[in-house]
Amino acid sequence: MAAVQGHLSNGADGPDGTDAGGDDTPPAFRHAVTALRGVRVRPEVELDPTPPPRRLAPYSYALEAVVTGASGDDEELAEGRLILLHDPAGHDAWRGTFRLVTLVHADLEPEIAADPLLPEVCWSWLTGALEARGLPYGEPSGTVTRASSHYFGAMGEREPSTKIEIRASWTPSEHPPPEPARSGPRRPEPAGEGAAERLGVPDTAGHLAAWCDLLCQIAGLPPAGATEAGVVSLPQRRGPQAR
């Protein structure tokens, strides 16, 4: 397993979206990103940095992921993007100062995609992944879309393909922030163990781990570690897809 890195947007970034180390970046956001960068994921998940959007919030951080098969297998089973947004002033729609946004998609067997309950099942995988790790969250919103393609003419020999796509966002619950000082000099930025809690930072590492659980489940991989009763994953699709 390897720790992840990523791109950071804080209004003072370089042209490629990397962190320019501006002192105006809020400490809470820096702690949230540091936690994300320290997450270690299972070997089937490949996480890479990607430039974050700049217009959704004053501060943002983004990662993209691909889930592959067994070691050395380049077949892509699922892929997605996770974006951490932060607005120190808060956002009415978020009901908080942080927001997580994701896009996940995978190719499926046509007979699996024909299940009328598939959208509800896929959405429950997202909420279930968060709840399984004990992560409080609020204001979930999103869509589950399935799209089938049939090929004709010169492409008629290709088998029909079906893709499932999850677009979602949710607000990770924050630790209660400290009471502001009534008077006196400005307090130093919290540091060391417990600093994130004192700044009101949500458990971003836990949310990233839960998101990776969702990716692996939609890719058809068994849960990491030991077999878990009652957990159903999508069967892996036919045929490899070159990367």
Image (cartoon, rainbow, N blue to C red):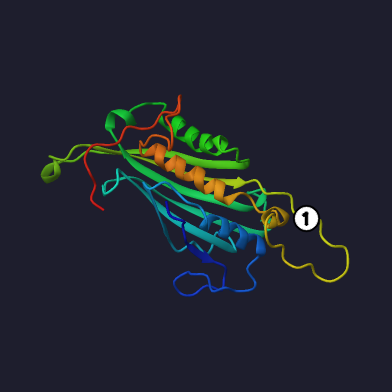
The correct choice, above or below, for 146 with respect to 208 in the image is above
The image quadrant that residue 122 belongs to is: top left
Q: Nearer the viewer, residue 143 or 61?
A: 61
Question: Quick check: 149 above or below 6?
Answer: above
Would residue 144 be found to the left or right of residue 55 on screen?
Answer: left
Q: Position of residue 76 (x, y in %)?
A: 30, 47
Q: Name the residue rendered at 81%, 56% in the picture.
A: 179
Side of 83 relative to 23 (left or right): left
Q: Quadrant of residue 34?
A: bottom right
Q: What residue lies at 22% left-to-right and 44% top-to-bottom?
A: 240
Q: Is residue 153 left or right of residue 77?
A: left
Q: What's the residue at 58%, 51% (across, down)?
A: 204
Number of marks in picture: 1
Q: Please, which residue is most extreme toward the top here?
A: 230
Q: Position of residue 128 (x, y in %)?
A: 52, 34
Picture quarter containing residue 105?
top left
Q: Position of residue 148 (x, y in %)?
A: 29, 37
**Residue at the spot of label 1:** 178
- Expressed as whole percent of the image width and height from the top left, the position of residue 219 reads 36, 39
> Of helix, strand and loop, which one carries label 1?
loop
Most distant residue in the right direction:
183
Q: Nearer the viewer, residue 147 or 102?
A: 102
**As displayed, is residue 24 above or below residue 102?**
below
At 49% across and 75% down in the image, what residue appears? Answer: 14
What crowding class fits label 1: few (fewer than 14 Cα within 10 Å), some (14-19), or many (20 or more)?
few
Q: Nearer the viewer, residue 45 or 154?
A: 45
Identify residue type, mark 1: Pro
79 and 119: which one is in front? Answer: 79
